[in-house]
Amino acid sequence: MSEAVAAKTALTAAPTTRGDLEVRLRRGAETVAVPAIALGAAAALFSLFLLLLGKSPLDFFALVARGAFTSWFSLQNTLQRAAPLLLTALCCAVPARLGLVIIGAEGALALGGLAAAGAGIALGGAPGAIVQLAMALAGMAVGGLWIALAGALRHWRGINETISSLILSYIAIALMNHFVEGPMKDPASLNKPSTHAIPDAAVIGTIPGTDVHWGLAVGLVLCVVLWLLMSRTSFGFAARIVGGNLRAAQLQGLAVGRLIVIACFIAGACAGLAGMIEVAAVNGRANASLVVGYGYTGILVAFLARHNPLAVIPIAVLFGGIVASGGLIQRRMGLPDATILVLEGIVFVAILASDTLYGRWRIFQPRSAT
Amino acid sequence: MSGDALGLWGVPLAVASGAIRVGTPFLFVSIGECLTEKSGRINLGLEGTLVLGAMTGYGVSLESGSPWVGVLAAGGVGALFGMLHGWLCKLPRVNDIALGIAMMLLGMGLAFFFGKPYIQPSAPMLPSISLGFWSDVPQVRAALEVSVLFFVGVALAVALWWAFASTRLGLIVRIVGDSADAARAMGYPVDLVRFLATAGGGFLAGLGGAYLSLYYPGSWSERISSGQGLMAVALVIFARWSPLRCLLAALLFGGAGALGPALQAVGVSEGYYLFYAAPYVLTLLVMALTVSPGRQLTGAPGELSVQK
């Protein structure tokens, strides 16, 4: 009932159907144009950075194109990297709809991967599909609970979720290190402490005709499903009210705490699933390879996508490509691997600074509103 | 006396000395963040500033031969980073918390980028003061080696506390932080005050970074800080925005951070990573105990977005 009231208020506040298309077109153009300007500005700033170091920006972008997109081989590599980014970006994008800035995907991914490896090893003899299902459920449950904890602390204890989710992330990585170097360590893994390998039957295969594992498809499906959930269901509608106006949500009697915890659980489950996929499709076991920055790049992808799960798809592919071309840039241009981090940092700052551009140009404003 | 004469007594001793040794970067970052937050803005990017300061301090100390030049350079870079944050946050609709995350990633990226050549060589270190001259026990002497920078930090904390309580400048920062409208009505330039407070906060966090690389642990690596900068931000809330309580909280967190290495030193290596997580768990616990929903904390700047 409370949702019906909210829907009614939203309807009366919305423009009439005649102007609706124009409003949508102009607003839509703005949400594409502003990030595009920010990306352009970031590319220009980064080019300046390279020029100051005596490196050619043209070489850099040509190498990114070559290392990421122009050949079938590099494109497959890009898609492989995009798979975890889709899921870690969702970990930031879903709670963002409720006004929460969650940045703990890195830790939820690590713990999810560890739990998945544990489940896989425990179920050694079972059929592959059952082991995979158990691994996915274990990873999602652990990752989900981890981020849900940040949401619960936020709602019932008033702790800032940005700080707590990052601190939980450090705790998660410490826990993973503890288990990987202690109780769950495979004695044969000397140079790189790891858990035992998951059973062969549980390894996630590749999509026919490609070298890209099925994790990419899982990520794409989840982006679409969560977009539907957040924009086409009453749950998503209630969540957006919480994000838009917390006081209004409370006055309408929405169970704000439950919404926050559920959304955070979904978010963490995505990151945990990313960990499971990295274990089951790429590494074959849980170890420090899970902590390579997918969580942090995912935050950037989510912000660039303006927390829209559908927009996450192209941007995750773009950044998957940039990450994938890192090795080539390192070899050909003699730049350190942190070059990609600098580029990501500049893009991130530019995209946040570009928030100030919204509403500045009349062309994007519906005439009735001005 | 033999080396392990203290036995298990070495643990509390190591924790106590670790409170100072590990706590000093917390102290610098937290009083820096305290200054920024008193002006009504939150800078979550100090983790990045800390890492960038560590790299800059180390590199400059190595190139110039003087660790103090390195410390100043680290502070300068930190101030520049603070200025960037302060300037961008002035723009309408730019979110200070999200921008802090971006600055954190940018700071780390720049530090790793320029820090590659400094991972191997050893730079001149900061001096320390020996307060353990009265003892014959080597552990006691080692434990009472205290960095000069710690005393600088204590002096800065006291100075900042005094400035907030009894100077005109401190009052202006507090007015801006409590009510931007009131400050504007009184004719104070809100954006400028916040810009300077964020730059000052960045300067202090940069000093904390130089301490990391030039005193303890005393080398530059990409894992030099794992969240100390962020914990220090949480610590300011725990300290209820008082520079003096920041000092106490920094020592508490330093002690927690020293627990793992201290136990390892006496042969308890089981669960090393769990002890390593102690300061993070402590951070969450103290935040859960000090903060409560729907109630403004005493001493909290009214304009702070983290409080809303």
Image (cartoon, rainbow, N blue to C red):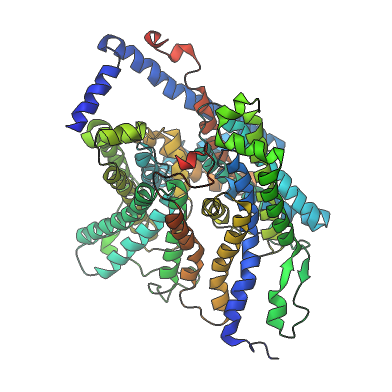
Percent of width and height locating residue A332: 61, 45
Q: Residue at 52% of width from left, 25% of height from top?
A: A356
Percent of width and height locating residue A113: 36, 59
Quadrant of the rendering where the N terminus of chain A is positioned: top left
| Relative height, residue A120 to residue B40 (above, below) | below
Q: Is residue A131 left or right of residue B290?
A: left
Number of numbered discs on residues: 0
Q: Is residue B34 left or right of residue B281?
A: right
Q: Is residue B36 left or right of residue B76?
A: left
In this view of the protein, can residue A19 be seen by the observer? Answer: yes
| Relative height, residue B308 to residue A40 (above, below) | below
The outermost residue toward the right is B65
The outermost residue toward the bottom is B1
Q: Residue at 80% of width from left, 55% of height from top?
A: B68
When asked about the image quadrant of residue A307, the answer is: top left
Percent of width and height locating residue A370: 43, 10
In this view of the protein, can residue A53 be seen by the observer? Answer: no
When asked about the image quadrant of residue B19, the answer is: bottom right
Query: Could you say which is closer to the camera, residue B274 or residue A63?
Result: B274
Percent of width and height locating residue A58: 61, 32
Q: Residue at 68% of width from left, 53% of height from top?
A: B157
